[in-house]
Amino acid sequence: MSEVYADRRVRLRDRCAAVGSPAALVSRPANVRYLAGGSPPGAVLLLGPDEDVLVCPTAPGGDPADGRLDELLRQSVLPAAGGDPAVAAVGFARKAGAEALAVEEHHLTVARHRAMGSVAPQLQLADLGGAVEQLRIVKDEDEIACLRIAAEIADQALGELLESILVGRTERHLALELERRLVDHGADGAAFPTSVGTGPNSGRGGHKPSDRRVEEGDFLSVCLGANYRGYRCEIGRTFVIGTTPADWQIELYDLVFAAQRAGRESLAPGTEFREVDRAARQILDAAGHGEAVPPVTGHGVGLEIDEDPQLAPAAMGKLDACVPVTVEPGVHLPGRGGVRIEDTLVVRQEADGGPELLTITTKELLAL
């Protein structure tokens, strides 16, 4: 794996050199992990003119959740009360002869940026922008393998919940049980706070579970994901509790399912981000639910649960092969509830079978 991380750092260094900065300082934890194999709390990564150094406030503790560090990467641990690793890294860069340093301004506070500049006033601080995030969009097969396992874990946890008695239990209780099952099946933890919505709460994106109890006839919408070795997936499903679905529930479910299928089927290398959104959105718009549709149909996933690309009406850019994304349209009707159906997929060439579906729990409207 050391070769993988070294290659990623070389590619970033090449990007920096192209804009006149021979050195870069990476401070965003997910980006540090992508380039170094791990992200101990507070650590920053300096890509210096001569060598790369991981600057840590304390010695890495070996927590599996922090990842496994590149063994060939030099580490510099600051002494007790040694200050800010980012400020220390600026000093290292200046001593190494760097005249310019690209930094992640979108991750730094104004106070931290000023402190870095005060250490070496002669050093020109440039904006690295989203260079690392752009490198992270296309995943290698090892990264996709981690996402595939995360999806399997989420499918297992959800499948077991569906076999249990649900009536009378609270949204909060169900969410906690799902997160426990994720860990039981090998996840490092939940990829994001699990959302469970029942009755009038169903179908809301990002709904925070409440103490509302599941009742017969409710829509039950669930959105969860597993974090496996730092890689995060997402799955969302909607069910009916304890009875034959009402006509309006069947109609709404079939509509959202058709939109989600259209979005999934549009995933291909070269497809514009906004075309994926349009494929799903136009079905819901035509049925008169345009105002109830979320602003984004899907997004990239990886070391973070919400990465580029964004599948949205105004998004610019085109999909590449080996880009994992979610497709998650939904409709929420105030006072009644709604439907969300979410999958994680990997964009593949048609010759390779088309989009690879990672989350495979049935999308049939089940009465539980």
Image (tube, rainbow, N blue to C red):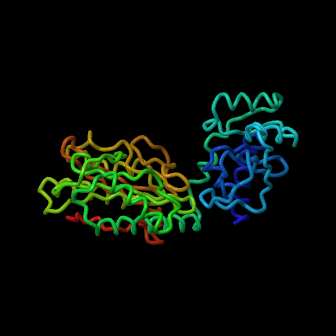
List x then y, in percent, for residue 311: 42, 48
**In the figure, is residue 245 to the left or right of 292?**
left
List x then y, in percent, for residue 278: 34, 48
Q: Is residue 22 visible?
A: no
Residue 334, image quadrant: top left
List x then y, in percent, for residue 319: 49, 55
Q: Is residue 24 above or below residue 367?
A: above
Image mark count: 0
In the displayed orientation, state which residue is furthest to the bottom: 352
**In the figure, is residue 356 to the left or right of 131?**
left
In the displayed orientation, state which residue is furthest to the left: 247
Residue at horizontal 83 percent and vertical 47 percent from the top:
49
Q: Quadrant of the N terminus?
A: bottom right
Q: Is residue 352 above or below residue 7?
A: below
List x then y, in percent, for residue 296: 39, 45
Residue at horizontal 68 percent and vertical 60 percent from the top:
62
The residue nearer to you, when weighing 110 against 309, is 110
Residue at horizontal 31 percent and vertical 68 percent from the top:
362
Q: Is residue 22 above or below residue 157?
A: above
**In the figure, is residue 97 to the left or right of 84?**
right
The residue nearer to you, when weighing 5 against 60, is 60
Q: Is residue 171 visible?
A: yes
The residue nearer to you, when weighing 44 against 186, is 186
Q: Quadrant of the C terminus?
A: bottom left
Residue 180, image quadrant: bottom left
Residue at horizontal 29 percent and vertical 69 percent from the top:
163
